[in-house]
Amino acid sequence: MVWYQIFVERFANGDKTNDSQPANFADSFNVPANWQLTPWTHDWYAPGAWAQAAGLKHNDNLSLRRYGGDLQGVFDKLDYLQQLGVTALYLNPINDAPSLHKYDARSYHHIDVNFGPDPVGDQKIIAQKNPADPATWRWTADGRETVLAFFNLEPKSVMLPLPAAGRYRNLLDPAQPTGTRRVTLPALSGVVLGKE
């Protein structure tokens, strides 16, 4: 098995319509008014014009950088990864979070809104949800994208580990404690998915 680790936000921008906006992380960071997405070819050590104008220190600049990587970018690169001989993907956290690395999840039940195709719609769905009331639980667009990853990976014989908790638990094989499993999903029906 050949594993490939992907830091989604820094991997590939497959959908420019879902790029980060200051509102997506302003609740946790002091975002300068002139903040902009960082170009992929930007010198890692050089501050962006917005960071320079704000007089940010290097670490503050890095904390606010976003490149726009998303799940579509991962899907777009699957053929390339397969050509490299990759047979399993390990994704850094993809939970909804204000940071670029996503280890500070706001929600363990939802994928980061900027990783899917409808950040504004997903934020509305998340805001209407009552975690204690399953009747309010709805699939977000980014949640559907995650499930679609299985459709994209299965024909390529690529495995994807999932967290053992959250709404995706019914995709997991309980006999495998890591939550890694090859799946074939026949249909998406609410939040209950078929097993292979």
Image: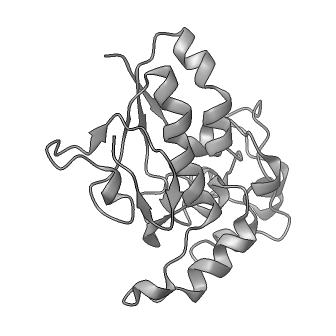
Name above or below for residue 5 compared with residue 195.
Answer: above
- Indicate the position of residue 161 as horizontal and vertical percent values: 34, 40
Instruction: Work out whether residue 116 or residue 12 is closer to the camera in this orientation and state it.
Output: 116
Residue 32 seen in this snapshot: yes
Quarter occupied by residue 139:
bottom right
| Quadrant containing the C terminus in the rendered view | top left
Residue 154 place in picture, x, y as percent:
46, 29
Residue 95 is left or right of residue 40, and the answer is left
Question: Residue shown at 46%/89% (left/top)?
Answer: 130
> Residue visible at 36% across and 16% down?
2
Pick whichever, 57 or 4, lies toward us: 4
Number of numbered callouts drawn: 0
Where residue 5 appears, x then y in whole percent? 43, 31
**Above/below status of 146 relative to 112:** above
> Where does the N terminus fall, quadrant-wise?
top left
Q: Nearer the viewer, residue 153 or 3?
A: 153
Looking at the image, residue 36 sits to the left or right of residue 47; the answer is right
195 over 36 or under it: above or below: above
Residue 54 at x, y percent in the picture = 78, 64
Residue at x 39%, y 65% (from the top left corner): 167
- The residue drawn where x is 48% and y is 57% is 102
Pick the front one: 111 or 64: 111
Colour basis = one colour
Residue 50, picture quadrant: bottom right
Judge whether residue 63 can be spotted in this image.
no
